[in-house]
Image (tube, helix red, strand yellow):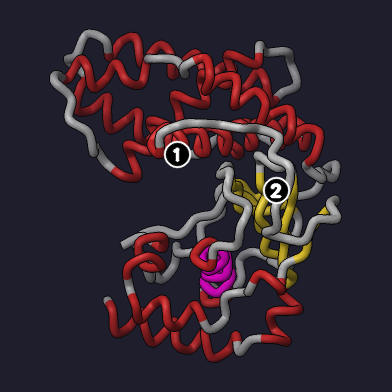
Amino acid sequence: MSLTSLIHTNKDFQEIIRKVTPKAADFKSYSTDVPPFKNKPILAESIFTSYISGLVRVSFQYMISAILARKNQDSPDKAFNPLARKGYEVIHEFFSDVPVMGELTLLFEEFTGIWDTFIRGEEVPEGELIRGAFMCSKLDTIYRLGVHAAYRSPTEFVQQFIHPPMPDVESDLKLLWQIFEERFPYEQRTEIKYFPSFDEKRRRMGGASADFIIGDTLYDIKTTKKHGYNWKEAAELMTYYLLNRLEGEPYNIQKLTFYKARFGVIEYVEIGDLLRNYDIDQALNDLSKFHRRWK
């Protein structure tokens, strides 16, 4: 069971995490006078189904990784989330005899070249990066969540990955990109950990990976139009920190941060404040006991 599923459905797990989950008042805002989780001007409006909204978020994750890697002069391979490739490989394995699979293969290979070119600092039409990121979002989602829709034929199933984003989706991603470039507080040549995992050694749950860590700050990207506090979202950030501690602290994390992409704001909580205000040691002990009891 994934971390998200545990937070949403397991009452024992919720009880452990909720005791140390930072409250709205614990958070601070960066570059805005509006308090965290209060009403702010929305810079990128959207009206999408929940499925498309999910694809937009994942697409934007891929785009941010490319943008940051380009700025930071990081390796293209380091910044490319392997879930997209795993999704492609699974589909290729099961649908290799579907004629349109050749078109998907060509598109995927072309995009990996575009990805490398962009990160190395060369000019790439923004539409090509966006369309490739959208394809990767679907491959990524299929790999993580499986197939939840009925397709009339194998050809129709494969074709979904070939279709480019609708014009309104592409426009939305372009705007989110622009806001990110203008509002995100990137610092030159700060070490970036892309898609860090917090559940590798002991496998306490079925998956716990975040968006990225820059320096000592863990980031979670939100593309929702909702600006209010959500304890389950804060709990997910907190659980990443707890798992990192239980794994022997492979990452140095001193801040837990939301980047609200549609508002261009950052809302964060400092670990030092959490250590003073909550019994983190007890939560670590309870989480270890929960794992032994649950598995």
Amino acid residing under circle 1: Gly
Could one spot residue 11 in this view of the protein? yes
Of residues 6 and 193, the one drawn nearer to the viewer in this rendering = 6
Magenta segment range?
A: 234-244
Give the x, y percent position of residue 75: 66, 34
Amino acid residing under circle 2: Ile
Q: Which residue is mark 2?
A: 192
Q: Which mark is residue 233?
A: none
| Quarter location, residue 203 | bottom left
Could one spot residue 112 in this view of the protein? no
Which residue is located at x 54 percent, y 62 percent? 230
| Location of residue 225 with respect to 88 vertically, above or below | below
Of the residues under marks 1 and 2, which one precedes in the sequence?
1
Q: Is residue 236 magenta?
A: yes
Which residue is located at x 57 percent, y 81 percent? 20
Q: Which residue is mark 1?
A: 54
